Amino acid sequence: MDSQLNFNIENSFNSRYSYCARQVLDELPDSFTISDPSISGHPIVFVSKGFLKVFGYSKDEVVGKNGRVFQGPKTDRKSVMEIREAIREERSIQINLLNYRKDGTPFWMLFHMSPVFSKEDGRVIHFVGVQVPISPPWRPRWSASGAVRNGANMCDDGDRVCGNIMFGSCRREVCSDTPVELSRVLALESVLDDSSRGLGIEETCEASYLEKQKAEAAINKIFSVLTRHSELTGRFVCAKRHCLPGAGILSSSLNISLGRIKQSFVLTDPHLPDMPIVYASDAFLRLTGYARDEVLGHNCRFLRGVDTDFSTLYQIKESIQTEQACTVRILNYRKDKSSFWNYLHISPVRNASGKVAYFVGVQIEEGSKNQDRNGLCPEMRHRSVVGAVKVAVRSLSMGAGPSRS
Amino acid sequence: MLRIKRVPTVVSNYQKDESEEAARRGGGCGRNCLNKCCIQGANLPLYAFKKLNKVVCDKGMPEFENREPPVAFLDSLLLGEWEDRMQRGLFRYDVTACETKVIPGQHGFIAQLNEGRHLKKRPTEFRVDKVLQPFDGNKFNFTKVGQEEVLFQFEASEDGEVQFFPNAPVDVENSPSVVAINVSPIEYGHVLLIPRILECLPQRIDRDSFLLALHMAAEAGNPYFRLGYNSLGAFATINHLHFQAYYLSVPFPIEKAPTEKITSLDGGVKISKLLNYPVRGLVFEGGNTLQDLSNTVSDACMCLQDHNVPYNVLIADCGRRIFLFPQCYAEKQALGEVSAELLDTQVNPAVWEISGHMVLKRKKDFEEASEENAWRLLAEVSLSEERFQEVYAFISEAIAAHASLEDSDGKSESLEDVDAITNPPCAMVTGTQECLVLQ
């Protein structure tokens, strides 16, 4: 993992929740992950011990990965699409999903995912995903008798385990004695593991009422921890959106789509005063040396310096006014004041109603080594970013889900 | 003979009224086209893909094909070349300026208002009762498009690695497959994949061409880049073999529809039928190799075209899920069985419309677009349950026949000569059968 990504991942969690949040979450027995849609690749930023136990990975093998790596050849594609759609629409989902352990064995689990909102501006900060293994023998969807029998089983041996989860609150006292509880859960799960090996995998599977309750309860506990520990940083989070994202805030799904584009580019919003940057790619931050919060909300003029040519600036201004694409070569400055020639392409980007919603600026540093990446010429690299941004913005402003119009 | 009148879609700037000949200048016909007159010595970018003969998802290991980020190379190439043509002004309109929305409701039909797509052209008569018709070099075909409308050549790499040549000579002997723009796009990145363009194949699925289309979906590696196919009689307007494709980063209603498994084949391909969707259709997924999946679907398509059943195909989820719809709208239209109200909307229910992406020509229809309206239109497209069962019965026979032939021959390369339909060596579907009879 590169160090920038590493830093972003650490920071994603630490900047939002107080330092002991990790410890408290670590004491929860459940299998869950927390991921950050604003980081390129929507990586997992926190993984629970229960998860590592169930899946057989070490922490370093999970943090930084996208949740899809736990899917496999038999994972139902429609379910995968439904999860993708829930993320897109920034809502909760509970779904039966076939996942794979590190050793390649598949198992059914109930996946419950919920967005974590910022109380302040309504944006999605994280997604929490809880995995409740569905106890075998896996019930085909229509076998009602099986469901009853297994539900009862689960209740019997899960009494101690689920008791706390279902009725326990998120009081510290409950959390504090969880190491014991954790070992019980793990013991139970390893029994389940052993009995599941060698069984043919069912095509469909239905979680029992109890398993659904367990997932729900786990989510509630995790949210309670996150909420409480966000109070200490002053950056409150909540399970329900308190306000619609304000101006200049992109939906998490747009963030995820833009995060796939690896080149240096920014998105600016011409409808806001002074046309500030509303998205900056990781490559842009690497190129210019700024941190993300130093550029978001600011006009691009901080890239200018004493020797920047005014006629070039005028050319840019004119293309923005006429809503035309333009390509220029402009002298820009990094945060450390060093200058570089920026082969810059700017293009308007329309939203689903056909109106110009943003301008995208794609930067290519002249003379930089990775110029010939994949054999695409600089002009084509400019245009491929513009194309990818246009597709993302157009599709993600179509009005399904709560994204900003 | 059944015919309908419709305004043909202008897919190329060279698809003018056939009488209009461009002035000849310099060498060739003056249009820098792909025909013999101009193609000698031409250069076009060449993308050579890695043959995924192993599989979409081979082993139980979790990290199989699951890399979405970063943007795959084919994706960047296609988007970059397409945006370049947009900035050069080759399209008839800016599709990103066309208003589009998700229609409220359970299914999430997508509506686009596109007033520019169908202007100008006069309605033309199309014969709709013959799915297979011979290629006619006098009509418009893709060898007549200008080279600037071609984005790149697309072929299997010889050494098994992805390769890209920004400027590769066109090997006329080798009959390249090409990707060209559709100058009347219905979404961003709308392109046409034309297999072995110089061979002038009619609109007719064969195993190799279908595998090529599946490779393109897999290589692009973007679940929102889908390919589609319309047979003659199911709203293809050009009888020159082609697939369409474009980007739309929202799930199509068809992809969300529940399915019920019918059977699994030996090669690992699972066949299901769609439930709770206005158009009856089949879903193909899985398969031990990409080729298994491809062969099964192309055998089904070949069976339909041999039985003269018009159909549409959608290749979704990076080539992992394929939807097949036999349809009868054009036939009903020709027989005068479609209501005037539906005809007035001038929506031609081809693969995209059937999948839930409706391109509307009138502002009124766009503003009044509702799930109910979309459903009503699509319900007209569907075969009746009885006919669908009949059609499925001979599809499953054809698939079984091909599969059993392959078992006895080992690997079979091309089975096009085998008349598996009229003379099925085996009438049973191999593999586990769960419910062969649809209800």
Image (cartoon, coloured by chain):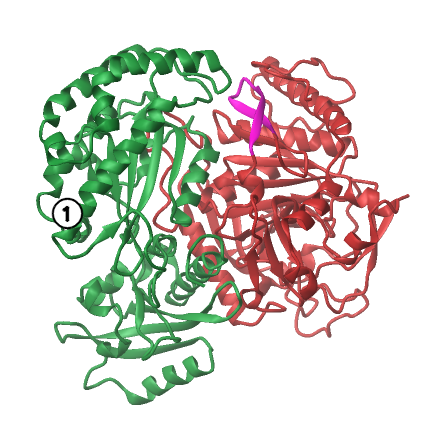
Chain colours: A green, B red
Tell me which amino acid carries mark 1.
His
Question: Residue B63, can we see it?
Answer: yes
Quadrant in which residue B284 is drawn: top right
Q: Name the residue under label 1.
A: A229
Identify whether B342 is placed above or below B257.
Answer: below
Left or right, B160 with respect to B148, comes to left
Q: Give the range drawn in magenta.
A: B258-273
> Is residue A385 or residue B321 the one in the foreground?
B321
Looking at the rendering, in which quadrant would you find the C terminus of chain B?
A: top right
Q: Where is residue B232 in the image (x, y as percent from the top left)?
A: 75, 44
Left or right, B406 with respect to A187, comes to right
Q: Position of residue B432 (x, y in %)?
A: 56, 14
Left or right, A161 with respect to B307, comes to left
Question: Residue A196, can we see it?
Answer: no
Left or right, B349 with respect to A304, comes to right
> Is residue B149 or residue A100 the one in the foreground?
A100
